[in-house]
Image (tube, coloured by chain):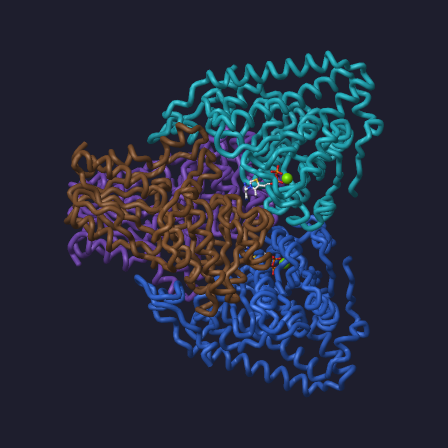
Chain colours: A purple, B brown, C blue, D cyan
Amino acid sequence: MPRSIEFRDALREAMSEEMRRDERVFLMGEEVAEYSGAYKVSRGMLEEFGPRRVIDTPISEAGFSGLGIGAAMMGLRPIIEFMSWSFSLVAADQVLNNAPKMRYMSGGQLGCPIVFRGNDGAGGQLGSTHSWCVEGLYANVPGVKIAIPSDPYDAKGLLKTAIRDDDPVFFLESERLLSVKGDVPEEEYTIPFGEALIRRPGGDCTIVSFGRPVNFCLEAAEALAKDGIDCEVIDGRTIRPLDIDTIVKSVRKTNCCVVVDQSWPFASPGAEVAAQVHRACFDDLDNHVYRVHSDDVPAPYAYNLEQEMLPNVRKITEAARHATYNA
Amino acid sequence: MPRSIEFRDALREAMSEEMRRDERVFLMGEEVAEYSGAYKVSRGMLEEFGPRRVIDTPISEAGFSGLGIGAAMMGLRPIIEFMSWSFSLVAADQVLNNAPKMRYMSGGQLGCPIVFRGNDGAGGQLGSTHSWCVEGLYANVPGVKIAIPSDPYDAKGLLKTAIRDDDPVFFLESERLLSVKGDVPEEEYTIPFGEALIRRPGGDCTIVSFGRPVNFCLEAAEALAKDGIDCEVIDGRTIRPLDIDTIVKSVRKTNCCVVVDQSWPFASPGAEVAAQVHRACFDDLDNHVYRVHSDDVPAPYAYNLEQEMLPNVRKITEAARHATYNA
Amino acid sequence: MATEATSRAGEAPLAAQLPPDTLRQWLRDMLLIREFEVRTMQAYQNRQVGGFCHVYIGQEAVAVGCTAAARDDDPIITAYRDHGHALARGMDPKYGMAELFGRIGGCAKGKGGSMHFFDASRHMYGGHGIVAAQTPLGAGLAFATKYEDEVIGRRKSDRVTLCFFGDGALNQGAFHESMNLAGILDLPVLFICENNGYSMGTSISRGTTMGHEITAKAAAYGMDSASIDGMDIMAVYDGIRPMIDRCRETSRPAFIEMRTYRYKGHSMSDPRKYRTKEEEEEYEAKDAIEKLVEHLKREHGFTDDEHTAMTKDVKKQVRAAMKWANDSPVPDNTELYTDVYTGYWGPYQGTSLPEMMRE
Amino acid sequence: MATEATSRAGEAPLAAQLPPDTLRQWLRDMLLIREFEVRTMQAYQNRQVGGFCHVYIGQEAVAVGCTAAARDDDPIITAYRDHGHALARGMDPKYGMAELFGRIGGCAKGKGGSMHFFDASRHMYGGHGIVAAQTPLGAGLAFATKYEDEVIGRRKSDRVTLCFFGDGALNQGAFHESMNLAGILDLPVLFICENNGYSMGTSISRGTTMGHEITAKAAAYGMDSASIDGMDIMAVYDGIRPMIDRCRETSRPAFIEMRTYRYKGHSMSDPRKYRTKEEEEEYEAKDAIEKLVEHLKREHGFTDDEHTAMTKDVKKQVRAAMKWANDSPVPDNTELYTDVYTGYWGPYQGTSLPEMMRE
Ligand SMILES: Cc1ncc(C[n+]2csc(CCOP(=O)(O)OP(=O)(O)O)c2C)c(N)n1
Ligand SMILES: Cc1ncc(C[n+]2csc(CCOP(=O)(O)OP(=O)(O)O)c2C)c(N)n1
Ligand SMILES: [Mg+2]
Ligand SMILES: [Mg+2]
């Protein structure tokens, strides 16, 4: 029978199960051990696995990211927690140059099986330095895989897959989702990368999203359904690899498409999906792809401004109406 | 009468003229003074302006980028040279969090009139850590402007505009172009941001590009012309602001479009242009937008692999043939 | 090279010589900061304040003492625990409170929040959210004042920059690059580490090598340094004043440890399991405000009535600030697109100064 | 805490006690590196080698002496001036030369080039192009060996990691974060600074505070340190051997300055205007290879004929390596899409070991 647990619990279960399964796996980051994580994701893990496998670090993102990469070069399987992905900017060289390219630069000699994880995207009024959607920057880089779950079930299944993956994985969580509950089976499961999930079937309009905004899309779809606009909501689950086939199949059926991406619009994953859909569905689309993003401005602190900036339900609904000529 | 000078000379003239014009302008970076720049761009500037305005730094990109930003907050107008934009990754937090957001975070109190400049994109067989096209990462970020000249004339005119601009500008040069010569008038001139240039008029196919690959596009256009395919080559000149109007106007005429962007394909400026063109020209396009990028792999060292990876003339020509149904 | 300034008032001759009214003003400034922070915490509980909010309670003597020892036009910059520095520099609390409330009347129009208090007209170059990210900026402020003196050749201002940061910043590369650059370029900047013993839940000994003697970090850059009792404003003044003067003369950077303590949690959501109640009480017993009150009473006949009156006055001022902040409207949604770029293009609507600077 | 190991052979008792054949092997290794680099420079002039290319001529004693003092399974990692370290670890020069030629037979299949020599089977974890970026990796290698000992509980290997970097890396934040992390986590790593006096055209005194005494950097992290004459392989061995042993025992990190000199330019395109011919000659007069030859002659009856024979033999080996490299084909264009990801998906074609490791 299904249990309902929080997103943060799902993350912890994934890490703990994989650490029991494979002693090469360890967790390192700021406040992950004695403080149980700034967001209590790793609560209890220090007690179970001890200080050699659950390791507190100083505020040295470049240092401990690189340390994790070095350990991965020797075959360990580090989980490096960024308290926020926003702080990964001080470690950008390590996460973008060393992790994703080690195998290539060494001509296949050394891999880098590492998971970087932490909060991504807007928290609650954290302002512009603390609200980065790093997929807008990092998705451009070959050699990484990027997973971005939208609910506890996916959080657990995708994180287990990430930890077992032999390549570097950027795992993007949302602080806003950590306390959200969802059904997660007791039984072991993993979720393959590169397989999008149709969260809501529908015939009139395809809505594609990743991570937290998937939930906004489902809300919008319900509202639109009341007006007889039946949307198919696709949760990409991973940005790299991108499951374009599932998206294209849906658009060939609905003939219109809205992409909802929480990152800034310019040169974003949303732009990529739009471009690829136009390429693959040139003869199928009744309208151009509509894109919903965070506004193209630094994240503001004020509550009303932040809410307005995010890819919210109102924007998604409007986009779907336009895409389906119901505006 | 026009003079022909090297790209590097054009850069130097722009900096020197602006430093004569405005004493708040200074140049700082690794080896810029006594060594005259790793690529001799600043040759003679130490002699003219002295060590207080042409300043060598240690290998501390995060440090001297932030130093420049702090100086800009006080109203100076720093030119910060990255020997290569690839090295800006260790300064990513400074250039992406502090420079572009200072005005916003301070509620309009403090600006950040700074220019970061240096080599961007593939040099000659420099391998994956030294061949970054940072526009693929940084173009996503609001608050910055990005200029990327394709010849000496633009290098000078755009750099002068960048130095006079009151907002942070990322100025992307190409090591491969530094020794290329071109006509540059003696007379003072600047080139406004956000105004693309039609480098070659044509009626059959619009080819849009930025920076060094613009030259490949012109080559390809000549080859295609021989086969009766008349391409219009547009040099974007700046990526932020993007002059989409000039591009759209051209596509409305040619009804097909190829975007050539040296960065990796996924979530790139090229993806953005493609998405915007599809949106604006949905009813005008006879074919989907074709995209030419560097291959989606880390930059290899081997000469043949690097040449194959780049958005070369062959790829552009093929793309234009397909876009115009001449394949 | 590290010098030691101790905490007994008798050994703070410089501060002791200052006119009593100056010390009274210090007391009022510290009381104002504490009251501001107490009400900030309440407002946060009432959800009038959002985001990350870090209060300065316990560390007041550092900001007030340092700015008192500096000139009003000496640039200062700090991290996200910045309310105290802005108030010490004389920002009207109403603009700070409005910023916390996310209102257009805030010092940053409600766009920056708690971590981004700025007051350019008072040479306060912000609050900055990324640990140590302000340290290169601090070096840059110092570079600029020196450049103005030497290149632009205005009348020599010889300004000294005070760059504040927490002990956690000692572990960030940016701090080290800044120290080295300041040393190589002879920048007139004082790097002031507010060592409150913890970065979030990590005691300095768990995160920082030589945490018991952080002036060793300065020695690595050939920099003069001092360790000062930050729980005694007179010791702060006496300790830092000569270093500011020397820096103004020589334009050489220096490093200063201010030994202090934050009485409250790291942010509003911190159970403080990582330290004992006893430890907290021990420090609260050394409270800097109390210490100064006693000194004023002992040396300058400061009376209980005066103390009560001052406290009342401060409470009144902060209450008024909260009212003002509450009456300030939230930013219009069009503010999303202002202050992004200087000019007007596409959706961007130029930039303007906040109300605070338009007075 | 900084200890001083001097350069007079008489004061290198450990090295002096080693069997003569060991010292001869050192000589051959140094000769091999120098010959490899001389031919590399020629090949670069002939455009057989591209990209950035940094030769190790003058610094041979450091890589050879350090690896000789370490165990073969002690991990090593360095920056982009990496040919010497790979060869010192026993990589067949033909794989290195093929890498420089951009051929599939290269140690990295021609994908990495001069700055990215790797030999995982010999525990050489690369050549890294970004200044100081390998220092956190070095800490990670040490973390891994310790983790394997303590957590995975294989037979204790007590491996010590040697992390090499140039003096320019002292100015990068990543280096400082690595030093602090190694100290806090007790990692068995030696940070070895090959101080050749210059980072590109910048003499250490122009770029690094305390450049005259960089062991001060170690003191900031409470780390043991030593300054060693890197132009004397016996001093290198005697200086580092006890530190390696101590590190193996205590698992405590340490910092070592190797005072050395690069005879050639920073890279292939460097006019060296920033230093005098005299300075270069002064150092070339202290040449480490010459010094060892003299020692072998003086102490172990090494003859001119033996010397000539050894030199001939080395030249022959390198000539053969160049021939082999030249015969190795360029990578097929399909190699663009291998070694990006481990598995097969989209255009990606999995990964495989280079020929060097398939022998
Ligand atoms: C680069 C970076 N990493 C992590 C954080 C999250 N964070 C915010 S404050 C803090 C602790 C800083 O402690 P300290 O520097 O001692 O300042 P204090 O809070 O004690 O004033 C951390 C880890 C951050 N803001 N920036
Ligand atoms: C972060 C970074 N900035 C700049 C460069 C360019 N660069 C390559 S080598 C070098 C000088 C390094 O000198 P040093 O560390 O002393 O090593 P050496 O060349 O003397 O062996 C510079 C500036 C780089 N590779 N990485
Ligand atoms: Mg602290
Ligand atoms: Mg050097």
Q: Which residue is drawn at 78% across and 42% down?
A: D2
Residue D277 in the image: above or below residue B76: above
Q: Answer whether residue A34 is visible to the viewer in this image.
A: no
Residue A149 in the image: above or below residue A297: above
Q: Answer whether residue B6 is visible to the viewer in this image.
A: yes
Can you tell me which quadrant of the image ligand 3 is in?
Answer: bottom right
* Left or right of B263 in this view: D250: right
Coordinates of residue D233 in the picture (x, y in percent): 74, 27
Residue B227 in the image: above or below residue C323: above
* Left or right of D135 in this view: C98: left
Instruction: Count how many numbered circles sit on residues in the image.
Output: 0
Q: Which residue lies furthest to the right in this view?
A: D10
> Which of these two is toward me, D290 or A36?
D290
Quadrant containing the C terminus of chain B in the rendered view? top left
* Left or right of B268 in this view: C4: right
Residue A283 in the image: above or below residue D28: below
Coordinates of residue B46 in the picture (x, y in percent): 56, 54
* Left or right of D347 in this view: A320: left
> Which of these two is toward me, D195 or C31?
D195
> Which of these two is toward me, C274 or C316?
C316
Q: Which residue is drawn at 68% across and 68% down?
A: C248
Coordinates of residue D334 in the picture (x, y in percent): 37, 25
Q: Which residue is drawn at 48% across and 65% down?
A: B22
> Which of these two is toward me, D228 or A268?
D228
Coordinates of residue A185 in the picture (x, y in percent): 40, 39
